[in-house]
Image (cartoon, grey):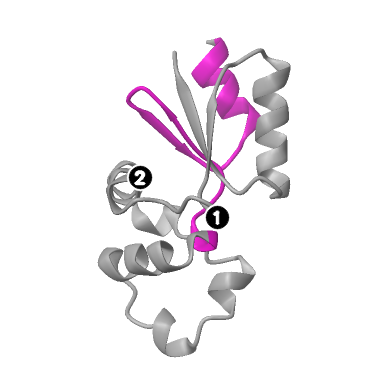
Amino acid sequence: MGATIYGIRNCTTMKKAFAWLDGHGIAYDFHDYKKAGASEAALRRWCDAAGWERVLNRSGLTFRRLPDTAKVDLDEAKAIALMLEKPSMIKRPVLETGDTIEIGFKPERYDELFLA
């Protein structure tokens, strides 16, 4: 099963996901959306699978530093526009394996995806 993991290389949560994948011998491609950005198609795919509320990282500094006017009346279209403009607002990591999209890192979910 091919896997692609999206995120920012120096993120602590990303490092945990990389360590889990490497430790279990899982091959993956890495897409650094801080450097390469994230496409609108990918963001729409992730939002369709998990909901934009889950894909948008509201707890990060990038989101918290936005002016209040940018945070008001959020909907999917506005959230996608924000994430396209500032990819740091995308929750990390996003893992795609075939038809499965996993948002965030939880070792038990990775166990289910790869070891079950």
- Residue at position x 43%, y 80% from top? 71
Q: Position of residue 23 (x, y in %)?
A: 73, 18
Point out the stretch of residues depicted in magenta. Answer: 88-115
State the image quarter where residue 97 is shown: top left
Above or below for 7 versus 89? above
Relative placement, left or right, of 63 versus 15 is left
Query: In the figure, is residue 59 to the left or right of 69?
Result: right
The local secondary structure at tag 2 comes to helix
Spatial CA span between label 2 and label 1: 17 Å
Q: Quadrant of the N terminus?
A: top left
Residue neighbourhood size for the residue with mark 2, other residues' Cα within 10 Å, grouped as few (<14), some (14–19), many (≥20): many
Q: Which mark is residue 34?
A: 1
Q: Is residue 110 magenta?
A: yes
The numbered mark, 2 or 1, whose residue comes first in the sequence reads: 1
* Residue 50 quadrant: top left
Q: State the image coordinates of residue 84 (x, y, percent, origin top left).
A: 39, 62
Q: Residue 80 in the image: x percent, y percent? A: 34, 62
**Residue at screen point 61% across, 66% down:** 60
Label annotation for residue 76: none
**Amino acid at dot 1:** Lys
Question: In the rendered structure, which amino acid carries the disc numbered 2?
Answer: Trp
Judging by the rendered image, the residue that carries numbered circle 2 is: 46
User: Considering the numbered disc 1 on the image, is that residue within a helix, a strand or a loop?
Assistant: loop
Depth check, front residue: 92 or 51: 92
Local crowd size for mark 1, using a 10 Å CA cut-off: few (<14), some (14–19), many (≥20): some
> Which residue is the extreme one toward the front?
36
Apparent side of residue 35 relative to residue 48 in the rendered image (left or right):
right
In the depicted view, which residue is nearer to us: 109 or 25? 25
Q: Is residue 10 left or right of residue 88?
A: right
Relative height, residue 84 to residue 115 (above, below) = below
Residue 10 at what x, y percent from top left? 71, 49
